[in-house]
Amino acid sequence: MRLEYFQLIDRILEVDIADKTIRTEARVPASSTIFEGHFPGYPLMPGVLLIEAMAQTAGWLLIAVTKFTRMPFFAAVKDAKLRAFITPGQQLALSGKVLHEGSGFAVAKADIRCEGKLACNAELTFRLVEFPNSEFRANMEKMAAILEFPSEMLANA
Amino acid sequence: MSSTFDTVAKIISETCDIPHETIKPESHAINDLGIDSLDFLDIAFAIDKAFGIKMPLEQWTQEVNDGKATTDQYFQLNNLCTRIDELVAAKGA
């Protein structure tokens, strides 16, 4: 994770276009100014950032499913459950699955596991829109490369 | 059509917490019921699931933006139900 850049996942491990599923991973930084406030003497990864990590995981899945033709913008979260405390330095395994691909929107579910246990899960809704401009898209492509997004697989799909 | 309306009215009532009795076939989802675009995504998700269809919202929105259609044609509930029935029929054809 690079919290200062709002990058909440480190790597895309697997995307299954047919099954519409994704697996990603992330390590919570050992230190961050965020932990100085949340909370002094008892650092915890904020739940809202865990939800964002799930949204980024599901978002990259939707970019893959739509073959990089649509940008998913996070629109709603339902039934978010923060089941365990996540602390600095912990390794997270994230997964997502598309529940419904509508016209201009999609609904997905995602979860985070830590040390083999379910730590949080939620249902997430996204608006799917065309990339706002070429600079935006170029930056997303750059980020895709950093995250090891399987671009070659999409080319062959 | 009537059963389609009943299903749609139930979905709208449950999704947006609107009293069922205020939802009429002639109600306009946006102008009369005050449903915003985010709530409509929830409604569209529920309608797509309930009827096994994919409402072409992007196409409808484009037609309205281009002046080729009015919002009444798609978002007045009796018209919306007709569109849903057409999509269900097309799926079975």
Image: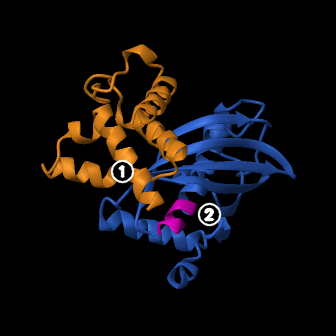
Which residue is under mark 2? A20
Foreground tag (1 vs 2): 1
What secondary structure is found at the residue carrying circle 2?
loop
The vertical placement of A34 against A148, above or below, is: above
Chain under label 1? Answer: B
Majority SS type along the magenta span = helix
- Dot 1 corresponds to which residue? B86
Q: Which residues lie in the magenta part?
A: A61-66
Q: Please tell me which residue lies in front, A130 or A29.
A: A130
Viewer-side residue, A54 vs B40: B40
Q: Secondary structure at mark 1?
A: helix
Residue B65 location (% of width, % of height): 18, 48
The image quadrant that residue B59 belongs to is: bottom left
Tag 1–tag 2 contact (CB < 8 Å): no
Does residue A62 show up magenta in the picture?
A: yes
**Chain appearing in blue on the rendered image:** A
Query: Residue B84: x, y in percent?
Result: 39, 45
Quadrant in the rendering for residue B31: top left
Please tell me the colour of chain B: orange
Chain letter for mark 2, please: A
